[in-house]
Amino acid sequence: MSKEVKSSIYTVLVIIQVLFGINFATSKIIVGKLDPFVWSNIRFFIAGIIMLSFCLILKRPHPKLTREFVLPLFPLSLVGMALGQGLFLFGLQKTSSINTAILTSTIPLVTMVLVVIRGQEKLTRNKLIGFIVAFLGVIFLRDIENVSFESSTFVGDGLVFLGAVCFGLYLSFGKKFLMSFDNMWVTTYMFLISAFLMFIYNIPRLELFFIPIDAELNFYLCSAYTIIGATLLTYFLNNWALKRAPSGNVALFIYLQPVLAAVIGYFFLDEVITIRMAVCSLFIIAGMFISLK
């Protein structure tokens, strides 16, 4: 792989983390007015319709409806979107935000274990050291001294971790599938299948759902961003990168989220970058550099 191609892939992976980082702030505004489960259902459905429109307008060749294409779509949609998202939201309700942040930080490690066990990638010394250094940087950045894995949060912690495992499974098993079929059509079907699966669960909740007509413009702007920027673009770009880069490398870039969130907070939310934040960010960046070298 040429340096230019690697540079393009790494740039896309950084953009994905920026989009996800901004989404943490916008989602807080949205779920303050809407049920988070119903909102996840809506954003996947709308993103799917938009992506379908692009496929039809651009006249993308539709993959043949073979067994190799149809059968993997449902489990990949389940672990990559519907189930992974649902477990995260369920778990977040039953545990603390700091526990959630720590447990979701295990996604790259889970992914690395899976790809090594399945023989997709080799566990080199550089990769192992890099993952550990970056993970330590994330852990200490997340206020680890406030973590409390007690019996009262056991169920929530378990659900969040299972959500992390689901995304790791998607990154590992989804790579070969994405290398075989058109990215736009695959992403379209994954959005729509996930929306359908979540709709089945959300049927009892729909009676209580209402659109906040009196909401401020900021709410609608955040909603539009979450659908287009943090859902449609992120999943499409993630699938694009996963098609071209090792699953472990794609997962590794998740460690950039807290660093980019700190930078965004500094420039746009007047937040302070502490010495601890700066040191931990250096650990994360150094770990990624070692692993990718």
Image (tube, rainbow, N blue to C red):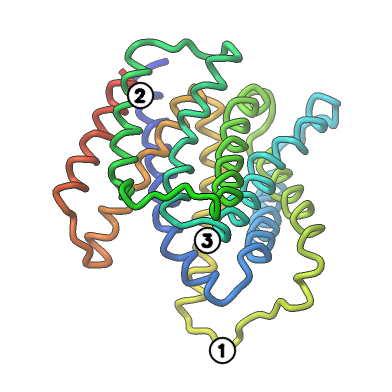
Q: Is residue 154 left or right of residue 201?
A: left
Mark 1 and mark 3: Cα distance apart in space: 19 Å
Expressed as whole percent of the image width and height from the top left, the position of residue 131 reads 36, 25
Badges 1 and 3: C-beta atoms under 8 Å apart? no
Instruction: Determine whether 83 is above or below 225 in the image.
Output: above
Furthest toward the front, the residue is 151
Q: Amino acid at mark 2?
A: Glu
| Residue underneath mark 2 | 4
- Helix, strand or loop for disc 1: loop
Which residue is found at the position 18% from the left and 40% from the top?
279
1 vs 2, front mark: 1
Q: Secondary structure at mark 3?
A: helix
Q: Quadrant of the N terminus?
A: top left
Please tell me how many numbered marks the rendered image carries.
3
The residue where tag 3 is placed is: 226
- Of callouts 3 and 2, which one flags the residue occurring earlier in the amino acid sequence? 2
Left or right of residue 60: residue 249: left
Image height check: is 124 above or below 206? above
In front of the other: 236 or 167: 167
Q: Residue at left 67%, top 32%?
A: 182
Which marked residue is nearer to the observer: mark 3 or mark 2?
3
Q: Name the spot of residue 100 as percent of width and height, x first.
A: 48, 50
Identify which amino acid the numbered label 1 is placed on. Answer: Asp
Q: Which residue is mark 1?
A: 214
| Quarter residue 198 falls in | bottom right
